[in-house]
Image: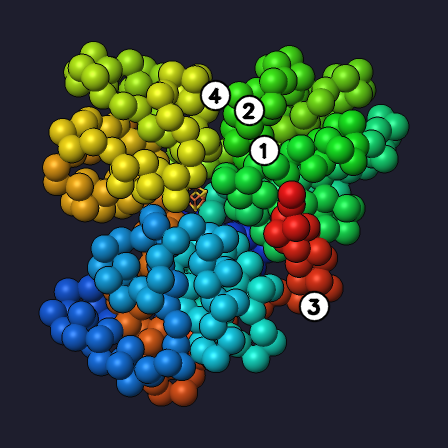
Amino acid sequence: MTTTTDLPLLFLGQGADPASERGVDCPGDLPAASDPALVERARAAKAALGDSVFILGHHYQRDEVIQFADVTGDSFKLARDAAARPDAPHIVFCGVHFMAESADILTTAEQKVILPDLAAGCSMADMATFDQVEDCWDALADAGIADRVVPVTYMNSSADIKGFVGRRGGVVCTSSNAKRALDWAFARGEQVLFLPDQHLGRNTAVLEMGMTLEDCVVYNPRRPNGGLTVEQLRNAKMILWQGHCSVHGRFTRASVEEVRARVPGVNVLVHPECRHDVVTGADYVGSTEYIIRALEAAEPGSAWAIGTELNLVKRLANAHPDKNVMFLDKAVCFCSTMNRIDLPHLVWALESLVRGEVPNQITVDADTAHYARVALDQMLALP
Ligand code: SF4
């Protein structure tokens, strides 16, 4: 029956846990962060590599890294951007581990995907391990419902989980197409197992598909049977995995009310990884790409409180000096794992490539990659 798979407690960048998205060693001999020549060294290494390297920068990365990105975007856009550059033998992914895995799955066998710091994992992706999800599926089978459940996994999951979903006829989704993915899934089954972000699953089901909160149950992988009765499993439309983003999950309804009281007329715009009561208290909800476009279209002089990662909000504030762009909650911090990728790690990765060494290559085994690609291709084929 359900087993508990405790993750070992590791300090970031120390110790090794290859099964985890976080806390693994980065073996690099890094330049000092205080080296005043870092920017020049990154520039020189990038110039020396020319078209042989393609640098991807996720929206949540630091400015010091983003300045060297050839393209920026969310995780799925970046993986597709990498696939569109088969001529580049080296893809340096300034993002987190599951994103580099997706890029490896979508690029050619000859291309090598590099993550400048192996400690850049994702706590949300870590909340659903392969063994836990297999145990969950066993619980669904014991409840007699496995054949009517369609698994759907958010892009923010490991390649193992995407492969699991692909093997069982499911689909990957992003925060932009979650409703279309759920429409597709409910056309094929009566229930959905949504991995690993409970908030995206709940917000999409309730706010975009007319379900109720009672139609959703939360499966806790650390409890027998997910902490649910067989009856609860059978009656739920949405079986939500108990996972969340460590950044977006911190915004609170109180922060929405506080900013409304402080800034009359403010527009509250949040990411769907935020909790349900935060999203229902906001004026707008959407993916990082949606948030960027909303700010571009906003009236000069308008005020915006944004509930997403702080690096992106800071860049939006700088890009729109004619608008009053602010962070929704002062207590919410950067994504600590995204921020593992800093200029010293980027310089080290690029200079290693110049020397002919390939550092921190991320590879997904062929079988997992095949089935993960099945689930990713299904997403691309969504009507
Ligand atoms: S912002 Fe959240 S979902 Fe994105 S990498 Fe960080 S922990 Fe993971």
Name the image quarter holding the N terminus.
top right
> Can you tell which quarter of the image residue 69 is in?
bottom left
Amino acid residing under circle 3: Ala
Q: Is mark 4 within 8 Å of ligand 1?
A: no
What kind of element bears circle 1?
A: helix
Mark 1 = which residue? 179
Using a 10 Å C-alpha cutoff, classify the residue at mark 2 as few (fewer than 14 neighbours), some (14 to 19) or many (20 or more).
few
Return the disc, 3 or 4, that comes first in the chain's sequence: 4
Mark 4 = which residue? 276
Q: Left or right: 113 with respect to 297? A: right
How many numbered markers are drawn? 4
- Mark drawn on residue 366: 3
What kind of element bears circle 2?
A: helix
Using a 10 Å C-alpha cutoff, classify the residue at mark 4 as few (fewer than 14 neighbours), some (14 to 19) or many (20 or more).
many
Q: For marks 3 and 4, give the CA distance.
A: 38 Å
Return the disc, 3 or 2, that comes first in the chain's sequence: 2
Q: Is mark 1 within 8 Å of ligand 1?
A: no
Nearer to us: label 2 or label 4: 2
